Image (tube, grey):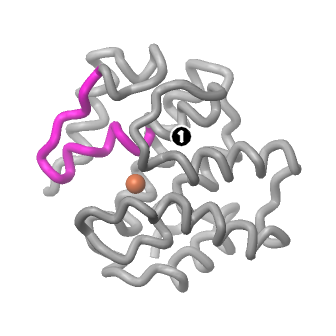
Amino acid sequence: MVYDHLMEDIIRIASEKYFLDIDGIHGIGHWKRVKENGLRLASLNAADHSVIEHFAYLHDSCRVSEGIDNEHGKRAAEFIRTIRSSVKLTDKQFELLYEACFDHTDGKVKADITVMTCWDADRLDLYRIGTRPRVYLLCTLEAKKPEVIEWASQRAWPK
Ligand SMILES: [Fe+2]
């Protein structure tokens, strides 16, 4: 289990919901890197840190396949509505989290800055499956920087 005191309850809820191997390619190591990616981007733009942290731990929680699973974002969005009382976000933040989860599988590149930063945080971790993040599929200027892609990819590559 990843130790993250402030997000402890959310990590537990996401882990209990998760059907796949928690140590697999869409599991907790990925969630943690998505958080780190997102917070690095958020230090450079106006994205909401709390929304990013929740997205990191919840966006893949409803995957049922390590392969193609196009509906898992929509399932995650519906799932977070069922745990609304455990999600310590304002209604405005929650709607951003919902949108970020719902649409993160559709390859979109335009949205609110917080939503785009969530998507980029996820896409920057693609190298864990051998795919370099493609600039045209990243949303924010911060994520498109070569040094950011390189930094994220170095961490994503399985050790
Ligand atoms: Fe992901």
Q: Which residue is mark 1?
A: 118
- From the top left corner, tell me how far across and down residue 137 is, in percent: 34, 28
Looking at the picture, tell me which residue is in the foreground, 37 or 126.
126
Looking at the picture, tell me which residue is in the foreground, 116 or 125.
116
- From the top left corner, tell me how far across and down residue 110 is, in percent: 54, 25
- From the top left corner, tell me how far across and down residue 30 is, in percent: 36, 58
Residue at position x 62%, y 61% from top? 77
Residue 123, picture quadrant: top left
Q: Quadrant of the N terminus?
A: bottom left
Q: Is residue 103 above or below residue 20?
A: above
Taking 125 as reference, is 59 left or right?
right
Q: Is residue 105 magenta?
A: no
Q: Which quadrant of the frame does ligand 1 lie within?
A: bottom left
Count of number-bearing discs: 1
Residue at position x 44%, y 56% from top? 32
Residue at position x 16%, y 42% from top? 131
Q: Is residue 123 magenta?
A: yes
Which amino acid lies under the numbered mark 1 shown in the image of this protein? Answer: Cys
Residue at position x 46%, y 79% from top? 18
Residue 14, picture quadrant: bottom right
The segment highlighted magenta reads 121-135
- From the top left corner, tell me how far across and down residue 143 is, in percent: 41, 23
Q: Residues within 10 Å of mark 1 (few under 14, many from 20)?
A: many
